[in-house]
Image (cartoon, helix red, strand yellow):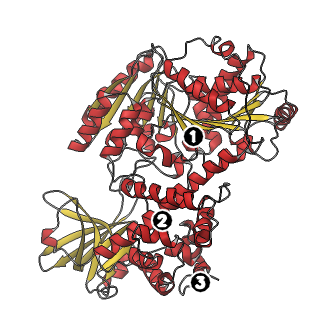
Amino acid sequence: MNPLHAPVSCIKGIGPAKQKALEKLGIRTLEDLACYFPRDYEDRRNKLPISELRPGISAVVKAVPVSAEKLHGTRSGKSQFRLTVEDATGSLKILFFNAPYLAKTFSEGGEFFFYGKIAGGFREIVMLHPDFSKAGDEEARDILPVYPLAAGLGQKDMRRWVESILPMIAEAEECLPPMSIERNRLCGAGYALENIHFPATRQKFKEARYRLVFEELLLLYTGLRSIRSVRASEKGIAFSRDVDMGAFTNTLPFKLTAAQDRVLSEVCSGMESPVPMNRLIQGDVGSGKTAVAAAAIYKAVMSGFQAAMMAPTETLAKQHYADFLEMFGRLGIKVGFLSGSLKPAERASALSALASGETGVLIGTHAVIQPDVAFSRLGLVVTDEQHRFGVGQRVKLSQKGESPDILVMTATPIPRTLGFIIYGDLDISAIDERPPGRIPVITKAVRSSMRQTAYEYVRKEARLGNQIYIVAPSIEENEGSDLRSAAGIYEELSGWFREFSVAMIHGRMKQAEKDRIMDGFASGQIRILVSTVLIEVGINVPSATVMLIENAERFGLAQLHQLRGRVGRGSRQSCCILVYENASDDVRERIGIMLSTDDGFKIAEKDLELRGPGEFFGMKQHGIPGLRIASLLKHLKILEAVKAEAAILLEEDPSLIKPENHSFAAKIDGMFGSVEIGI
């Protein structure tokens, strides 16, 4: 048995409480601990004297505590512990939040290492809530890992535990094929794991990181290629070529754009093929993806099959249901609805009509993939807002039929550079043209000092009967942060706009409460909605004409564009107001892009260019396995090498059944869980 498969409780010092805290980080075995990588490093080779500290840098200081003070009554209710330390060059104030217990630690005297970010201004600087250790405890190593932590865990604990399993890490089993290691000049697995945690030199760290990034991307890319190959080898449904699509499109109250016609043609070709279709429709906000999906559903039903559409929220599902009732009702096609909020009798009736084949089109939430949902003859599966669903959820829905075609939609602009790796199991169609007649959204940017003027504009729009979104980057205020919070804005605006109904929505609310509030906004009962980015993807409210985004400098370009797309959906002129605090060159450039274009694809490409090293999007949001160390933006060059290596591997051994590929194939299986792949 692999010794790294043992539970973490076998390490001395990890009792039930620590074990529970580690489980919150996904660490249950020694292997999980070995693969829990540092987020940063303390480089103690270049310790800075206090006199050389400057705001904005992170630094290591070796100093002696000389005084301590407990502070209370901060705006957020958090306590503060302020420590003053000295070295030979000067003194420094260090601020800890909610940590009064540290008073005893520093009362013992002696020198300490402090590692943290320096804040403040010209007159006084302060180090905010740093990591620290007693001088002499960890001086044997010059470079120390800094891990993401959970409550009840400390950096010293994590370092000690990882260090205790280094002998096992050094002997870690190799999962990559030997030829892959040789072709790409990679270091060994044990060497990589040792030096990602405790690198002796920068060069060893770079070798370790390259190896681990390459391995992770190779597993991901090969797994996605295998999923695609499984789909391509299955026998699918060849839908009828004789369906008169004009009989459906001519009933629409608008004419399809050239881009919609092109994508619909691609979809129909895929549906008529005997190979199961697995296609993504990517289109900017308001480009008309739903109309194309509805046409595909019509083709499926007129070919004698059923179709299902899954939406991420009940509110959005209800909206699609209302639209499809009107769309298909006049054509004699029965549309059903399924969600977790249906009463037992309603649910039973919906399931019966579906199983008998009476219902041709089913619209619903995640409820449609429950075990007791049975179709008579499911032929087409559609998922809306693809990045809210995972590969596994699509597969579960498709298993309700015999290799049905799959059509997924997203309004999230993904740079073409990353299209395949994000949606590696899908063919991609892009609707890159908007319907004529749609009034462009006016975008304005104002400094936070002009917020009152922006709010007066909001009042004017509300008095005209229009609705307003106000978005904040956080739910609550955080100590030491100047970010505006949804809770603070809601409290402020409830008094400012007493003549209107104001509501707040955020991700910590229960789903039923979120649905109630969104339904109230969709129906017009709520005039002003304060929210976090929860409404970035959501419902169609034609009477919403203002999107006001607080701390706009804290959002990525693609995210700002998605938020802007929540307005401008009706016949009235709409406006997006970007309220920003920081006027750095980077902020000015990003805001300038938002003011100059409303093309989501151009914005996504620019976002990739500007935020290359940053977090462009969360992996989990896009429905593919999470990555521990690789970044699809930071490591584009490595990704190109990975694609070349995957092509060689799969050409030589398509099912990865050769002995030298067994460990690699097993690791891919583990990465993708229950999703069926071709290895």
Which residue lies under the disc numbered 2? 215
| C-alpha span from label 1 to label 3 | 39 Å
Name the N-terminal-most of marks 2 and 3: 3
Residue 386 circle label: 1
Outermost residue, front side: 652
What amino acid type should be assigned to the residue bearing mark 2? Glu
Mark 2 closeness class: few <14, some 14–19, many ≥20 residues within 10 Å: many
> Residue drawn 29% across and 72% down?
115
Q: Secondary structure at mark 3?
A: helix
Relative horizontal placement of residue 626, taking residue 356 as reference (left or right): left
Q: How far across and down, in percent of the image, does residue 159 sit?
A: 42, 79
| C-alpha span from label 1 to label 2 | 26 Å
> Residue drawn 62% across and 70% down?
662
Which residue lies under the disc numbered 3? 3
| C-alpha span from label 2 to label 3 | 21 Å
Residue 400 visible in the current orientation: yes
Relative horizontal placement of residue 97, taking residue 235 as reference (left or right): left
